[in-house]
Image (cartoon, helix red, strand yellow):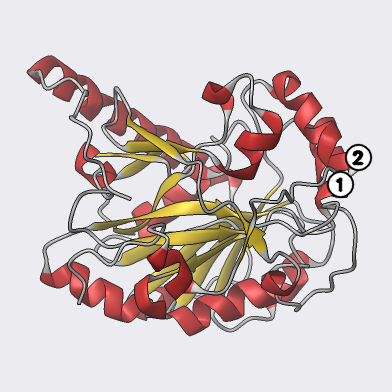
Amino acid sequence: MDASAPRTAPTSLWFAYRMRWKRRRLLARSLRRRKELRRHSVMPDRIRAAPILAFSTIRNEMLRLPHFLDHYRALGVDHFVIVDNDSDDGTAAFLEGQRDVSLWRTGASYKQSRFGVDWLTCLQFRFGHGKWCLTVDADELLVLPGGRDLRQLTAHLDKTGRDAFGALMLDLYPDRSVTEGGFNAGDDPLDHLRWFDATGYRGQRHRVFDNLWIQGGPRDRAFFRTEPERAPTLNKTPLVRWNRRFAYVTSTHQALPMRLNRVFEPGRPTGVLLHTKFLPDIGAKSAEELNRRQHFENSALYAPYHQSLIAGVDLWYPGATRYEGPSQLEQLGLIGRGDWP
């Protein structure tokens, strides 16, 4: 996908000044929250020696973590920097036993930390400067053009003078109710979630941050048909050669400085984040979220969405496409090879 629409963000000096101060405020806010993080199994020497780091905030993800770690190890991640937000399902104990994971824990509010972004920003500030930093959730699996790895990708980005890489978040779903079936820790989510929407995506320029704002997919189709502006944002910039002056604004959807957002441009390679949200535990997770109210700015607006997931909504439809691999996504135009030979 590429951003062929004309840019709409302001270009005045006053706007540039405002964005510069917004970035500084975000960094200051994040650094203040470092006191909320408690060190557990932290390996600073291994972090410093790692060319490619993965950052993630997680809570109760034991079902996904074994495959998540193996996927990113195979993709080329050298070390994981993880914040555990008060898990009680064995997640922390599991992570403490991994030799390539540095772990921090916190019981502070996920919502008040800008949904974990503040915690990760202060760790990126400390450990990520000058390194390629991948920021992903436990239910996101990055795939690249041609099925290649992060070492090959970052070499190309370095060669072409780019410091950011974009990816479309692609929701995967089963061919039945989302709460049906069994799934165990260590299983491959792609054995359970085999379907996706190949079409129906729309993109427009964000009026402030100049990124290609992409929406669509099964959640848009099933839950936000009458209010499409509220549908989930699918564009992300998960991989950045980090600098202490950088800051994410909203998850990895937008970042500052603004040049980091221009990743869906003609000629630039792009990837896909396979979104494995709809495993059978989604009903229990949605019930917990209705109680905790930590995942949305206005949680009450999303109550019907969570209630549908608890009830076991079926997202499959006759136009669904069975997932076959990265080459298929490239043929469909969801992954872009760009100038990456």
Is 180 left or right of 195, judged from the image as shown?
right
Query: Residue beneath label 2, please?
Result: 311
Please report whichever mark, 2 or 1, sits nearer to the chain's N-terminal start: 1
**In the image, residue 100 above or below residue 292:** below
Tell me the amino acid under the disc marked 1.
Gly
**In the drawing, what numbered circle is on residue 129?**
none
Q: Is residue 339 visible?
A: yes
Residue 23 spot, x, y in % from top left:
29, 33
139 sits left or right of 250 in the view: right
Disc 2/disc 1 C-alpha distance (Å): 7 Å
Vertical order, 16 against 106 (above or below): above
Residue 248, picture quadrant: top left
Kind of residue at badge 2: Ala
Name the residue: 38% across, 33% down: 26
Depth check, front residue: 328 or 274: 328
SS at mark 2 in the image: helix
- Residue at figure coordinates x 50%, y 59% from the top left: 273
What residue is at 37 percent from the left and 78 percent from the top?
A: 146
